[in-house]
Every structure is written in C-alpha cells, then in structure tokens.
Image: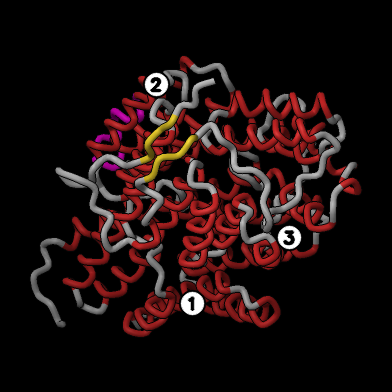
Amino acid sequence: MNRILTTLFLLPVLAGSWAVAGIPELDGLVEQTLDIGEIPATQAGTLPITTSSSKAREYFRKARHKQWNFDIDSAIRLYRKALILDPEFVRAHLQLGLLNVPKSNWHRVRADANLYLLQKSERRFVKLLLKNRLRTDSLLELSAKYPNDAEVLLYLGRSLSQSGQFPAARDAHLAAVKKYPVSALAWQSLGNQYLALKDNYRAYIAFEKEKSLVPDRAQAYLALGRFYLKTWKYDKAMRMAENVIRIDPGRWQGYVLMANALTLSGDSEVAQEILLSRLDAESDPIQNLEYQIALVDSLIDDGNFPEAIKHLSLLYRETSISDKDEPIIDRQMRGRDIYFLNRLGDTYLEYGDYGSAQEVYDNILRICEESFRNEPGLAAIQTTYMFNTARVALVRKNVREARRLIVNLSRKVSHDHDANLKQKIAQLQGEVHLVSGDPEQAILFLKKIGSENPYLLNLLATAYMRAGKTALAHQYYKKAIEYSSFDHYEYAFVRHKARAALRKSEPVVVDRE
C-alpha cells in the first residue's frame, strides 16, 4: 500500500519563506517530511504497555496516535479492537474512560480493579490518571525513568502548568514534541505554554504547525482562534470561528469562540443573541451547558449581573439534581454543582450583594464538609472558604476580620509551602491596605506577587489611582482590559470593572508622580 507522505511545515509567518532563525529548539521540527501513518514503535526509555497481545498493543498505539491528532471516533474504534483481542487490557479501558465514551464509569472501575496486572511504574502512572491527580513529583520521577515517553511528558507539562510553573511546563511539552512531532495535541500544548509565557511568535508557530497536521479538523482552527483572542486580534478570531463552524456546524466550541470574540470586541449584544439562538436549537445537555456558561461570561462582561445570577442559579439547580450521586471531587470540576456555586458566590460579591455571597460560600463549605472524606482535599476547600470570607469582610470594610483570616491562612503556608496560597495572602494584604487608605503599601504587596493575572492588574491600577499616579493606573487598567482570556471566568469581572474605572478617571489630568 502506498504511503501518504506529508511535508510538515507551517504557513509563512511573513511573506516569503520560513523564518525560524533564532528558534533553535524548533529546528528540525517545523520543516521535515514524515510519514504520519507510521506510528513510533516502542523504544528504550518509554513506559511499558502491558497486554498479552502484540496486535492489541499495535491497535493501542494507533488509537493513541489518532487521539493525539483529535480523531476521537477512530481512536475509540481502535481501543475497542484492542479490547476484543485482550479484554483485560487496562490501558485501553482507561483511555476509553478518559474519552468519556458510553459506560465510561464502567471502564474506570474495570481498570482500577485490574491494576495488579500492570508493572509497577505503569501502575503508578495509571493511578495518577484514574484519580485525576497529576502529581508533579511522581511525573518527574517517571519522566526521568522514561525520558522518551511522550505521554508522560505531556502529562508532566500539564501538571507543571496547573501549578503555574510555565517555563518548566514549556520545556516538558517541547520535549514531548521532540519525541512525537506528529502529534497535533503536543504542538497545541506547546503553543499554550508559549502563550502563558507571552511568547506570541513561538505560540503562533506551534498553532500553525498543529493546523498543518490536522488541516481538515476544527480543533486546529479553535486553537488559532483562542490564540487570536489572547493577542487582541478579534477579527481573525472571528474568521477562525467561521472555519470551525464550516467544518463542523454542530460543534459548540465554534459558536462559543465567535461569541467570545464579539464580546471582547464590544459587541456583547450580538454575542448573546448567538448564544441564545443556539440554546433554543440545542438538545444536547452538555453543549447546552457550554452555551449557558459562555452566556454568563458575556452577561458579566456587559455588566448585566442580575441576568448572570439568574442563569447561574438555574445551572446550579440543574447540575445539583443530575449529579447528586457523584463524588464531591468530581462535582467540583467544570460543569458540576460546586463549580456553579463558586461562580454564583463570586458574582454576588462583584454585584455588591455581600450577604448572598457569604451565604453561598457558607453553603459550599457545608456541602463539602458533609460529603468529603479526603483530608487534603477538604483542607484545600477550607482554605478557599477563608480566602472568600476575607474578600467579603474587605468589601464590608471589616479589616479586623480580614486580618484574622489572613493570619489563619498564613499558618497553613508553613505546613504546605503553597506558592498559590502565598499569592492569595499577598493579594488580601494589599487589599487590606487599600481599604485602610494606604495605597502605597498596597502597591508594595501587590507588586510582590509579580503576576500577570488581570485581577491583580486591576487591583494595582486601583492602588496607583488612589496614590495619585494616574498614568500608571491607566497603564494597568488597559493591561487588565486587554487580557482577553476566557480561561477563567473572573476575568469578565475584571474587564467590566477596569473599563468603568478607566472611563471614570479619563478626565483626570493632574498627576502627583
């Protein structure tokens, strides 16, 4: 059978030929001819794949290749073929469960029951995935033992990214790309890390490389569209959304991308019309959920808090009924009732209904304490509760209560050395000084964090404004507004607040700088 050879190269970044000079880490990856039908065989330094059938192992590798290039239907078929040959093939059961195919819970249970079949290192890796616990230390050990395993490197990169270690995450994803350069997923993951590091040129190269691998699939256009959102090119993001809808008219991500681009470009009314029309036409509950989440983001960005609260309350009621038998750890994930309760509490807080916000936070703690049996998980929930309660105390000008909670949070840092918690404490300390009328001290605490989080950019802008440094305040307000990521819903609050503050302060012409 004739092989289909595909030259893997990117579209020119500028008119003319390729310009990758100065990017040695990508040399040899962006311009090469590879047979994308040839799946890399097992080699030294890769995690074992335990199965009694060599043919099942071959199907597994091909399925994973399809999965890493977003051909999920083909991947599912191949994983099922592998299971016909070896019904006890744990990794194939696991992958089907992770892909959320029908009876996915059955696959998870079966894999968990058969872990004893695996070699020690493979069993350790599977346990991390089954429990949704991407422990960085365990993955670092596995990557040191199996340095050529792209899957381990991809999960390591994801774990590092989740903990905010973006340079290390980039290096892990770059290593994965070098081990498996025909994976669109690996290139997309690398592009996302370049974005997190604000290296837009390399991000563009990675996303275009992804598109060259899967030119007929909507996923690549989605990745580029999200890139354009984060680099303020909303017209280009709209064109990517149109491509997604053209290729796959039933894919909710294309419509949400279009709505996000419209919202960020200031046309939230049209964005909401699109989302409402999709809600009317959509019968699938999962897609319906995503449209409602995007609608809430657009409403908040538009300052329509009452309508956003109405939708969040409805979403919470719907998911709490459907998910009542699910473990709390799963219900905290996106699209579950605890997630929507957190969103509802934050929306009440930003709207100015502080009593309702505190009631929601109290309810979250009560539900989790009644249901949660995992001590570290419960400790994290209690920490979040103290942080949220301190925020409520601050907007109520109750500085004494906020300081008491900060002390309690600081005691937890000495035990777990949590960098994220340290940042939250510094944020609260900065806000305490803002409320207490000492913006210069607030600036010192907030700048200590050194984060590009738009929430902190907006707080810094507010502190500079109160210190009489309007030029710096305007600079930070604009940064907060231009941070156009929809990865975290609270950024919609920030854009709304920063725009309002900037409009209010524009007449100010006297500076004390």
Residue 410: image location, x then y, percent: 61, 80
Mark 1 or 2, nearer chain start: 2
Q: Check disc 3: other Cα within 10 Å, few if <14, some if 14-19, many if 20+.
A: some
Marks 3 and 2: CB-CB under 8 Å?
A: no
Does residue 267 show up magenta in the picture? yes
Position above or below: 204 against 296: below
Mark 3 or mark 2, earlier in chain = 2
Quadrant into which the N terminus falls: top right
The range drawn in magenta is 263-273
Residue annotated with mark 2: 247
**In this view, which residue lies farthest toward the left?**
509
Colouring scheme, one of rainbow, by chain, secondary structure, one colour: secondary structure
Q: Disc 1 or disc 2, which is closer to the eye?
A: 2
| Disc 3 residue type (three-letter) | Gly
Disc 3 versus disc 2: nearer the observer = 2
Circle 1 or circle 3, nearest the eye: 3
Spatial CA distance of label 1 from label 3 is: 23 Å
- For the C terminus, which image quadrant? bottom left
Q: Is residue 226 above or below residue 161?
A: above
Secondary structure beneath dot 1 equals helix
Q: Is residue 438 left or right of residue 170?
A: left
For mark 3, what is the residue?
Answer: 377
Tag of residue 240: none
Q: Amino acid at mark 2?
A: Ile
Asked if one can make out residue 38 in the rendered structure from this viewpoint, the answer is: yes
- Judge whether residue 30 is colored magenta: no
Q: Residues within 10 Å of mark 2 (few under 14, many from 20)?
A: some
Q: What residue lies at 39% left-to-right and 21% top-to-bottom? A: 247
Tell me which label, 1 or 3, sits earlier in the chain.
Answer: 3
Residue 102 quadrant: top right
